[in-house]
Amino acid sequence: MPRVLHLIDASDPQELRLALAPLLQRLNADRWTQFVAPLSGGVSHFPFTSDRIVGRVPVRFGLHFLAAPALRRLLHRHRIDLIHAWSLEAAYVATLASDRTTPMAVSRWDPHLVPAQAGRLLALAQRTHTGILCHAAMVERRLVEHGVPIERCAVVRPGVDFGLINCLRRDADLREQLQLNDDDIVVLLPPSPCGRAGHWAGAWAVETAARLEPRLTLLLPGTSPEREPILKYFRSVAQPPRYRVAGDHFRLEQLLCVADVLLVPAEGDICTTALAWAMAAGVPILGCADYCITEFIADGQNGHLVKPDEPMLLAGKLLNVVRDRQTNAPLYDRSRAQAFECFGLSRYIEQTQHAYENLLAGQPVSTDLTASAVTD
């Protein structure tokens, strides 16, 4: 029975939680033994890992090589067959602690790469038994553009828990906890630690549209570097729109279940997990026609798009979306059906397991793995 070690950190806790929890809970326990080892810091963001933790790997003073001996001992003690590194930092520590023949999967959900990151990923790809699991085709595209061999990459789209979404949609207390009125039209900006999701443009569009539709209420997530400047701006204008600030204890799936629109005016490559969950929840998506968005959304087919860097168009389109929601209901039903086909949990588990098997067999991670197209 192969023994898999998930090496995690808290660099992007929401993406990690949504991707790792289904594997720990649903991967066939008769075929796989799974362990978890966090890098430095606590695991308060990941309570579902508590019964799988076999040790911590401290990274002292930001020096990764100091963590290698602890991880090497852990790998030997638990006879680990495959390492799944859930961040670039975790992958780097794993390369220092393991030999080149140890199979390793590296998860990557952010398509944006700075040169230093691209260099590290290119070095990782030189290891014969390493594969990069890309959560979107745009991630794979960016890696290949930076020289990573395509056979070292596999697109494994995120899994969405439809049962959880249906349960949360029946939870009437969520709106009350967020202090939302029944008549509020909630516009959610996606969580974005990277700061490229266009929160400024989204806030401006909501403020502009709210002059004609005062029920519009902006819902700001808890993980945005632009949150405080936006709130400061709202406090300075004469007639700010309604807004609510979601604390860090509200999860993405909870926010989507009270949202009437997901607004994604991306200003570059961003993580797209929120799009998959919004499609599954049947939430209308309005975004800019950036490559990372158009992989999921086609204008007039399963969502709405405007030209990038056109805030007035964005505000006008937002008004149309909220006013024509009933008319466009079949469009959002189509979006939900596409999500069921592309982002089902069983498909995600099956593809991840297949990627593991490829690496353990010494084959390229992408062997016999195909990613379904979201849009036609």
Image (tube, rainbow, N blue to C red):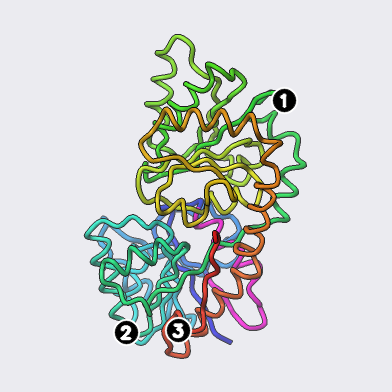
Q: Quadrant of the N terminus?
A: bottom right
Q: Secondary structure at mark 2?
A: loop
Magenta stretch, residue numbers: 15-35
The answer to which quarter of the image holds residue 179 is top right
* Residue on which the image places disc 1: 182
Q: In the figure, 160 relative to 143: above or below?
A: above
Could you tell which of marks 3 and 1 lies nearer the N-terminus?
Answer: 1
Q: Amino acid at mark 1?
A: Asp
Could you tell which of marks 1 and 2 lies nearer the N-terminus?
Answer: 2
Q: Position of residue 149 (x, y in %)?
A: 31, 77
Circle 2 residues within 10 Å: few <14, some 14–19, many ≥20: some
Q: Position of residue 164 (x, y in %)?
A: 70, 52
Marks 2 and 3 sit apart, C-alpha to C-alpha, by 12 Å
In reply to whether residue 266 is colored magenta, the answer given is no
The answer to which quarter of the image holds residue 143 is bottom left
* Residue on which the image places disc 2: 100
Left-right relation of 271 to 162 = left
Q: How many marks?
A: 3
Q: Secondary structure at mark 1?
A: loop
Q: In the figure, 317 relative to 124: above or below?
A: above
Q: Name which residue lies at 60% across and 62% down.
A: 343
In reply to whether residue 22 is colored magenta, the answer given is yes
The circle on residue 256 is none
Q: Amino acid at mark 3?
A: Leu
Marks 3 and 1 sit apart, C-alpha to C-alpha, by 51 Å
Circle 3 residues within 10 Å: few <14, some 14–19, many ≥20: many
Marks 1 and 2 sit apart, C-alpha to C-alpha, by 57 Å
* Residue on which the image places disc 3: 359
